[in-house]
Image (tube, rainbow, N blue to C red):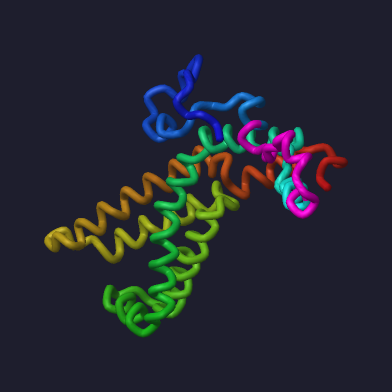
Amino acid sequence: MMAHNRNPGPTLPEYDGNPLIAGLPPLPTQAELVQAFASRPEIDAKERAYPGHLRKHCIMRLSRYFEPLERQIQLAERFSMVLRQGYLPLIGRILIGAPFIMSGLGKLAAYQATVGYITSVGLPLAGLGFAIAVLMEAGGGALLLLGYRTRLVAPLMALFTLATAIFFHHNFADQNQMIHFLKNIMLVGGLLNIAYFGAGPLSLDSALGKKALAPAGQHA
């Protein structure tokens, strides 16, 4: 195991003052990663003199021997970089996308009530509105969560969210509706930020983009 109480050495300005990163262990060196992943059973020289039936059990310790490969160490280093530089966009997408998915699935389980609510505000084609709502909330939320086609999905969801605020939560005399209106406006702001900045490193967009940019021989 790596010692977390060692002197972390030089710090990077992009990580300073971030309480979430401060809670992580110090960045390990390659030697520390090897030490952390390796499993080397202890062998005592005096065990060579043990009776055969005991030495057989000592030999079985070799099944626990493990020495990490260079590729595994490189993977651990890349994971450490992504964890420190890409987790905030992922958390943001989860916090926005998950409620959309829950809302869409809730509508899917309450067709009559949802269609009735759409009709009650005077909108035509309530059945089509229901389909659009489920598609945007459940489907769009899932794509947002995965970080796929984010720059296309996020502005469409922002437009949908703004439309629902205008058509369904415009009665500011009702405090509950005003709260929902402001909540939708805040969601629009978050979605527009995602549309502009993208999904971040921990996303399908990032993974597929890197694969597309890789030389042909490295796709396998």
198, above or below 135, in the image: above
198, above or below 18, in the image: below
> Number of callouts in the render?
0
Examine the rendering and report whether any part of residue 197 can be seen.
Answer: yes
Given the current orientation, which residue lies at the most extreme right position?
217
Q: Is residue 69 left or right of residue 84?
A: right
| Residue at image coords 87%, 41% | 217
Q: Is residue 103 left or right of residue 169?
A: right
Q: Is residue 176 left or right of residue 67?
A: left
| Residue at image coords 65%, 38% | 37
| Residue at image coords 77%, 49% | 51
Q: Is residue 59 left or right of residue 102?
A: right
Residue 36 lies in the magenta stretch: yes
**Foreground of the two, 17 or 163:** 17
Q: Position of residue 35 (x, y in %)?
A: 64, 31
**Foreground of the two, 97 or 176:** 97
**Foreground of the two, 51 or 110:** 51
- Magenta residues span 35-55
Residue 38 lies in the magenta stretch: yes
**Foreground of the two, 26 or 19:** 26
191, above or below 178, in the image: above
| Residue at image coords 78%, 52% | 56
**Image quadrant in which you'd find residue 184:** bottom left
Given the current orientation, which residue lies at the most extreme left position?
173
Q: Position of residue 126 (x, y in %)?
A: 39, 78
